[in-house]
């Protein structure tokens, strides 16, 4: 599974707080993925992050 953050992040920090193994804030305060390829066992967390994002900028690809 792959995950990415597209343009439109509002820097709320929800993804980085709930899923720090998958997301971090960059120097501009915008969320980014730690690794585009989701580590084995974290697929459900990636899906949940995409669902929880208030501006729907987290996308997953199976």
Image (cartoon, rainbow, N blue to C red):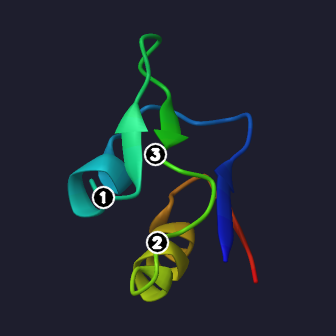
Circle 1: element type: loop
User: What kind of element bears circle 2?
Assistant: loop
Distance (Cα) linking label 1 and label 2 = 9 Å
- Examine the rendering and report whether any part of residue 45 can be seen: yes
Q: Which residue is mark 2?
A: 39
Kindly identify the residue that appears in the image at 46 percent across and 82 percent down: 40
Residue 51: mark: none
**Quadrant of the image for the C terminus?**
bottom right
Of residues 47 and 35, the one nearer the viewer is 35
Residue drawn at x 30%, y 62% is: 19
Q: Is residue 13 left or right of residue 40?
A: left
The residue tagged 3 is 34
**48 or 10, nearer to the observer:** 48
Say if mark 1 contacts mark 3, CB within 8 Å: yes
Left or right, 54 with reference to 27: right
Residue 1 rendering spot, x and y as whole percentages: 67, 77
Sooner in the amino-acid sequence: mark 1 or mark 2: 1
Please tell me whether mark 3 sits on a helix, a strand or a loop: loop
Which x, y percent locates residue 22? 40, 57
Q: Residues within 10 Å of mark 1 (few under 14, many from 20)?
A: some
Q: CA distance from mark 3 to mark 2?
A: 10 Å
Above or below, 41 against 10 in this view is: below
Q: Quadrant of residue 21?
A: bottom left
Q: Position of residue 33 (x, y in %)?
A: 52, 46
Q: CA distance from mark 1 to mark 3?
A: 7 Å
Q: Which residue is mark 1?
A: 21
Q: Residue at x 39, y 87 (%)?
A: 41
């Amino acid at each position: 599974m792959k995950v990415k953050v597209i343009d439109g992040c509002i820097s709320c920090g929800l993804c980085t707080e709930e899923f720090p193994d998958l997301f971090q804030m960059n120097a501009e305060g915008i969320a980014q993925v730690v690794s585009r390829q989701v580590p084995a066992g974290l697929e459900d967390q990636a899906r949940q992050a995409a669902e929880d994002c208030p501006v729907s900028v987290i996308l997953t690809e199976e």
